[in-house]
Image: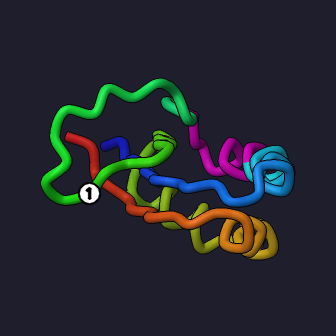
Amino acid sequence: MAAFLIVDTQIENAEEYDKYKLLAKPIVEKFGGVYRARGGEMDVRETDLWTPSRMVIIEFPDMGAARAFVDSEEYAPIKPMRHNNARCTLLLLDGA
């Protein structure tokens, strides 16, 4: 069953965040991830719990692959680039 990595991102340093995106993409793909949305237009209809900023959705083959990416040695040195240049909420969600 597919799993999704969902990130709401408020970019604070676009130039450095662009570098992060270039480095993260091949690692995502190595773990079977496919970008389904990456900062596209949003039509937000309800905001009772939170107001999203910039959504990224990556589909992985399963929850194990999604967790393996997030916890991987390959991604570990790249993750601080995201933390240093954006505020994020990240979650992994099992598909239906």
Which residue is drawn at the image coordinates 58% and 42% (left, top)? 33
Front residue of 35/46: it is: 46
Using the rendered view, name the quadrant where residue 20 is placed.
Answer: bottom right
Region in magenta: 25-35
Which residue is drawn at the image coordinates 75% and 52% (left, top)? 24
Front residue of 3/12: it is: 12
Report x, y in % for residue 13.
76, 58
Image quarter (top left, top right, bottom left or bottom right) of the C terminus: top left
Q: Count of labels shown? A: 1
Amino acid bearing label 1: Trp
Vertical placement of residue 40 versus 68, above or below = above
Image quarter (top left, top right, bottom left or bottom right) of the N terminus: top left
In this image, 19 relative to 70: left or right? right
Element at label 1: loop
In this image, 19 relative to 12: left or right? right
Q: Is residue 32 magenta?
A: yes
Report x, y in % for residue 95.
27, 43
Which residue is drawn at the image coordinates 74% and 75% (left, top)? 80
In this image, 36 relative to 21: left or right? left
Report x, y in % for residue 78.
78, 67
In this image, 40 relative to 42: left or right? right
Q: Circle 1: is it few (<14), some (14-19), or many (20+) Cα within 10 Å? A: few
Vertical placement of residue 16 versus 80, above or below = above
Which residue is drawn at the image coordinates 53% and 54% (left, top)? 9
What residue would you read off at disc 1? 50
Colour scheme in the image? rainbow
Using the rendered view, name the quadrant where residue 91 is placed.
Answer: bottom left
Report x, y in % for residue 12.
68, 60
